[in-house]
Image: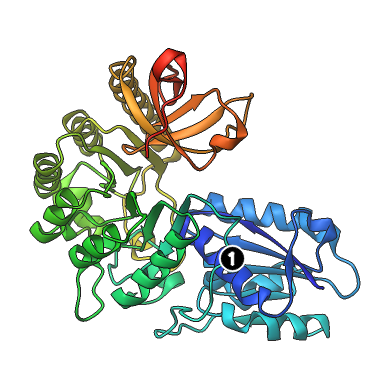
Amino acid sequence: MPRIYIETYGCQMNVADSELVLGVLEREGYIAVDDPGAADVVLVNTCAVRDHAEQKVFSRVGELKRYKRPGSVLGVVGCMAQRLGPRLLERVPQVDLVVGPDGYRGLPELIARARAGERAAEVEFRSWEHYEDVPPVREGAAASAFVTVQRGCDYRCTFCIVPMTRGPERSRKLADVVREVERLAGTGTTEVTLLGQTVNSYDDGAHDFADLVRAVGGVPGIRRLRFTSPYPTDFSGRVVAAMAETAAVCEHVHLPVQSGSSRVLKRMLRRYDRARYLEVVAALRRAMPDIALTTDIIVGFPGETEADFQETLSLVDAVVFDDAYTFRFSPREGTPATRLKDVVPDDVAGERLERLVAAVRGIARRRNVALVGSTHEVLVEGWAKRGDLLQGRTRANKVALLPGPDEWIGSYRTVRFTGTTGSTFAARPVGQMGGLAVVG
């Protein structure tokens, strides 16, 4: 049987797409392997959001090409493949095929052609493609799963490459999403994360995101519901109410802000200003007082002044984020931001990033130190990368490391936080006679 090896870079959407790729190829008799040296087909699923991500892929492809042998195939799929298309074949002669996110259905034929010596690129957008008939191949009977509900994006932020790599926004039918979640629940999945580029703008023509939240949250067996990434101004009153009234919805929202300056937000073509963003934060906290908020922030966007950056720092202080993904602006070919004047020098952007990271970490540490001694329910996800501890996650997306046996993976435990590094927690199971408390 032919063997397939996939490496995935980037966001949760790419993880879900890799599961789709395995679903497409499994129907053709492929089996997944963990060693590129043992594979007949090696695919790298890529991200194009920042230049650093693309350079990392180029480096990795350079390493993987040593595994090529007569009849084997090396391919690049995903957003970077979509962005570069045939140019990628020219730049890396060892790459046999390049396939964008809407072309995975054609992989078996493209691989066959590549084995016959024909290099090919497939980067056509297909607005109808949701892969409804392709069951994703997920690892084992995982307790947690990603479910794609929306593909593409219609928001044209000046810095963002996603509309060019994912195409126009389109939503799956609510009934199709619910059926997939019901199948997952039937195999033991208890936590699902709904995925979309602006997930809370979901609209299948008859239902909005509020309807979707209530429907998925009501599937028997689903006890945790997450979603990413939402857009701030798509948190309508209906959506916020659905979150607060659906018990499965977790008390965590990743709420990208990008900048705390209204002037910079306008240049980014974000559809809100600083005041409107803070209104959304307030609405979420009124509805869900224990909610944890994380965010994305870009520094060094063209034209950003020190005064603009100070507004970002003050917004971080005002919101009190639990964490933030912070980046220096990365110009992406073809996006409007590359035509903006007043480029911020690299050393200035780097220094601002250092200050921002210090501010975010300081706030996160203070919030986490205050949680030491408190008790939480965690879903045990697996073994931590280091040491002999299990890793669990709270509903508020806090990561805890705890001692326990392999059998706990996939179960819910009650733990007490005993310490923190500032980002993760040390924890101990709680229960009678020093034993274990299983929730549910």
Residue at left offset 70%, top offset 69%: 75
Amino acid of disc 1 = Val
Residue at position x 51%, y 32% in the image:
391
Residues packed near mark 1 inside 10 Å, few (<14), some (14 to 19) or many (20 plus): some
Give the residue drawn at x 42%, y 63%.
147
Answer yes or no: is residue 10 visible.
yes
> Which residue is the site of mark 1?
137
Q: Nearer the viewer, residue 35 or 360?
A: 35
Residue 65 picture location, percent across and down: 80, 60
Residue 362 sits above or below residue 282 on the image: above
42 to 135, vertically: above or below = above
Where does the N terminus fall, quadrant-wise? bottom right
Residue 432 horizontal/vertical position (percent): 40, 17
Q: How many marks?
A: 1
Residue 231 horizontal side relative to residue 51, left or right: left
Front one among 229 and 19: 19
Q: Is residue 332 visible?
A: no
